[in-house]
C-alpha cells in the first residue's frame, strides 16, 4: 500500500486501489481502543437517471434510500444490525443526495465485524414480500417527513432554486414513487452502484492497513463492474425560479431558509479549495462573531437557532442560511445589505485572519472524531480529492478569494427565501 505522512496533523494515510476497483483508505491510530469503518457507494437520492454500459436507465425517486434499508436483511431472518450489535459494534447507515454509507464503530471483534459489513453490503437478498413490507415502513417515514417543518422549509427552498436537478426531490421519494420499486429494481441498482469500482472503504483506528486490504480482497467480488455516469439534468440558470415561498404549519415561531445555487468546481483540488473558501467566506459573512449575526441578534431578529452552510453534493452547490425569526424577510434584506457592503468595502483583514485561525482550529479538533474523518475521506474520494489535504490547503486561502466568492456567487438577486409560518386560526 502507498502511504503519505501528514506531519502537520500527525497522521499517516495508507491508500490502495484493489484489482476490483475498490478504493481503500486507512489511518492507523496506535494505542486507540475505538476503531471505525465505513463502506460507501457513490450512489444517493439524486442518482435516478444514469448511463452504464451504453444503456440509459431511469429509476423512481427513493431507490437509493430504499436499497440502504433492505441491505441489512439477512437470508436467515436476522438483520446485520442485530448481529453487529451482538458483537459489540455500534452500526448504522445513511443515504444523502450523493452517497450511501454503511458504518460501525467498535472496540473489540473488529475483524469479524468488518467481514460482516463487507459481506452484507455486497450480497443483496430481496424478495417481493420483504419489499412490499418495506414500502409500508418507508411510507410511514415519508408521511412523517411531510409533517416536519424542517423538511418542508428545506425542500421548498430547493424547488425554488432548482428547475430540474433531482436534489429538489426528497431522498426518501414519495409514497407513489416507492410503490414502483420491485425486488428486481433493487437487484439491478445494487449490481450497478454497489460494484467495487463505485465504492470505497475507509478505516481508522489501531489496525494494520495490509490486513484491512487482505480482508477486503477475501470478502468482495474480484469483478469490478462498470462505473455508472449520473445524469442530473440540464445546467441550471443562476437565478431562482421563485423568490419567496410561504407555507403554513403547526409551529410556534416562523422558520426560514435563505438559499442560492453555487457553481461547483469540477473536482480534485479545485473542489476542495472551493469548499474551504466558501466555508471561510460564510463564517465571515454570517458566523457567530460576524457583525451581521450580532446586530440581528441584538435586534431580536435572530436567536441561537441559526446556522449557515454550503452543501456540495451530486454536482450541485447550495447555500443554506436559516433558523427562526419573527421577520424572515427582514433577515433577507439585512443579508442583501451585508453582501452589498462586502462588494463595496471588502472583508476586514483582521477579522479574516481571526476567522481563518478559528476555522483551522475547528478542523484540527475534527480530526479527533473518527467518524468525521472517515466520512470526509469518502466524500473527497468520490470528488477527486483527499480530505486530509484540507488543513494545509486552508492556510493558503486568501481574503481576496473569499471576497471574490461572495461577489460572484452570492449576489442579492440570486437569493431565495423559504418561510414556514405558524398556521393562522
Image: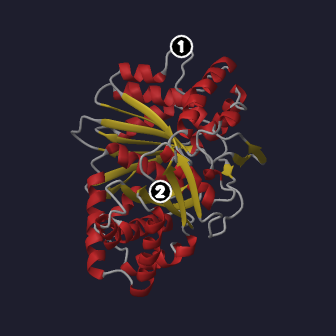
Task: State the residue position of label 2.
Answer: 256
Report if residue 360 is visible in the image.
yes
Drawn side of residue 43 relative to residue 293, left or right:
right
Q: Between 210 and 170, which is closer to the camera in this rendering?
A: 170
Residue 21 in sight in this render: no
Residue 334 drawn at (x, y percent): 42, 72
Q: Quadrant of residue 84?
A: top left
Residue count near mark 1 (Cα–Cα under 10 Å), binned few <14, some 14–19, many ≥20: few
Give residue 101's mark.
Answer: none
- Rendered position, 155 above or below 208: below
Residue depicted at x 45% and y 68%: 330
Residue drawn at the location 36% of the way across and 43% of the way down: 371
Q: Is residue 158 left or right of residue 270?
A: right
Q: Residue 111: horizontal and vertical position, in percent? A: 37, 28
Res 177 → quadrant: top right
Q: Is the residue 191 above or below the residue 54 in the image? A: above
Q: Earlier in the sequence, mark 1 or mark 2?
A: 1
Most extreme residue toward the front, as rendered?
Answer: 425
Which residue is the extreme one toward the top? 76
Residue 390: % across, % down: 37, 62
Q: Which secondary structure lies at badge 2?
A: strand
Residue closer to the observer: 255 or 60: 255
Q: In front here: 206 or 309?
A: 309
The residues bearing labels 1 and 2 have C-alpha atoms spaced at a distance of: 44 Å
List x then y, in percent, for residue 114: 42, 30
The residue nearer to you, when weighing 395 against 58, is 58
Residue under pointer 1 = 77
Secondary structure under badge 1? loop
Amino acid at each position: 500500500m502507498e502511504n503519505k505522512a501528514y506531519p502537520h496533523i500527525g497522521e499517516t494515510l495508507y491508500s490502495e486501489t484493489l484489482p476490483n476497483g475498490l478504493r481503500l483508505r486507512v489511518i492507523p491510530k496506535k494505542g486507540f481502543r475505538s476503531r471505525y469503518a465505513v463502506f460507501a457507494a457513490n450512489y444517493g437520492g439524486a442518482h435516478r437517471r444514469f448511463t452504464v454500459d451504453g444503456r440509459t436507465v431511469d429509476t423512481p425517486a427513493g431507490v437509493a434510500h430504499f436499497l440502504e434499508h433492505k441491505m441489512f436483511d439477512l437470508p436467515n431472518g436476522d438483520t446485520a444490525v442485530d448481529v453487529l450489535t451482538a458483537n459489540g459494534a455500534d452500526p448504522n447507515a445513511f443515504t444523502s443526495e450523493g452517497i450511501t454509507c454503511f458504518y460501525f464503530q467498535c472496540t473489540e471483534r473488529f475483524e469479524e465485524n468488518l467481514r460482516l459489513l463487507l459481506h452484507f453490503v455486497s450480497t443483496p437478498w430481496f424478495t417481493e414480500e420483504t419489499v412490499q413490507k418495506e414500502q409500508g415502513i418507508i411510507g410511514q417515514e415519508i408521511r412523517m417527513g411531510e409533517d416536519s417543518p424542517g423538511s418542508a422549509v428545506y425542500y421548498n427552498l430547493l424547488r425554488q432554486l432548482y428547475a430540474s436537478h433531482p436534489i429538489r426531490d426528497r431522498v426518501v421519494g414519495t409514497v407513489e414513487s416507492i410503490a414502483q420499486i420491485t425486488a428486481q429494481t433493487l437487484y439491478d441498482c445494487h449490481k450497478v452502484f454497489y460494484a467495487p469500482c463505485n465504492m470505497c472503504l475507509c478505516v481508522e483506528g489501531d489496525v494494520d492497513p495490509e490486513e484491512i486490504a487482505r480482508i477486503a480482497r477475501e470478502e468482495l467480488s474480484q469483478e469490478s463492474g462498470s462505473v455508472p455516469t449520473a445524469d442530473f439534468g440540464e445546467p441550471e440558470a443562476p437565478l431562482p425560479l421563485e423568490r419567496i415561498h410561504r407555507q403554513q404549519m403547526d409551529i410556534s415561531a416562523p422558520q426560514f431558509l435563505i438559499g442560492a445555487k453555487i457553481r461547483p468546481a469540477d473536482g480534485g483540488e479545485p473542489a476542495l479549495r472551493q469548499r474551504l473558501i466558501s466555508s471561510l467566506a460564510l463564517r465571515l459573512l454570517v458566523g457567530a462573531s460576524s457583525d451581521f449575526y450580532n446586530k440581528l441578534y441584538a435586534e431580536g431578529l435572530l436567536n441561537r437557532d441559526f446556522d449557515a452552510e454550503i452543501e456540495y453534493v451530486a454536482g450541485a452547490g447550495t447555500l443554506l442560511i436559516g433558523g427562526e425569526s419573527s421577520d424572515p424577510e427582514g433577515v433577507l434584506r439585512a443579508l442583501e445589505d451585508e453582501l452589498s457592503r462586502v462588494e463595496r468595502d471588502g472583508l476586514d483583514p483582521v477579522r479574516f485572519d481571526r476567522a481563518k485561525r478559528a476555522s483551522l482550529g475547528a478542523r484540527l479538533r475534527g480530526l479527533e472524531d473518527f467518524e468525521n474523518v472517515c466520512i470526509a475521506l469518502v466524500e473527497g474520494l468520490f470528488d477527486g480529492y483527499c480530505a486530509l489535504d484540507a488543513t494545509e490547503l486552508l492556510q493558503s486561502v486568501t481574503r481576496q478569494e473569499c471576497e471574490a466568492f461572495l461577489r460572484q456567487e452570492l449576489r442579492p438577486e440570486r437569493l431565495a427565501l423559504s418561510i414556514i409560518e405558524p398556521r393562522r386560526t
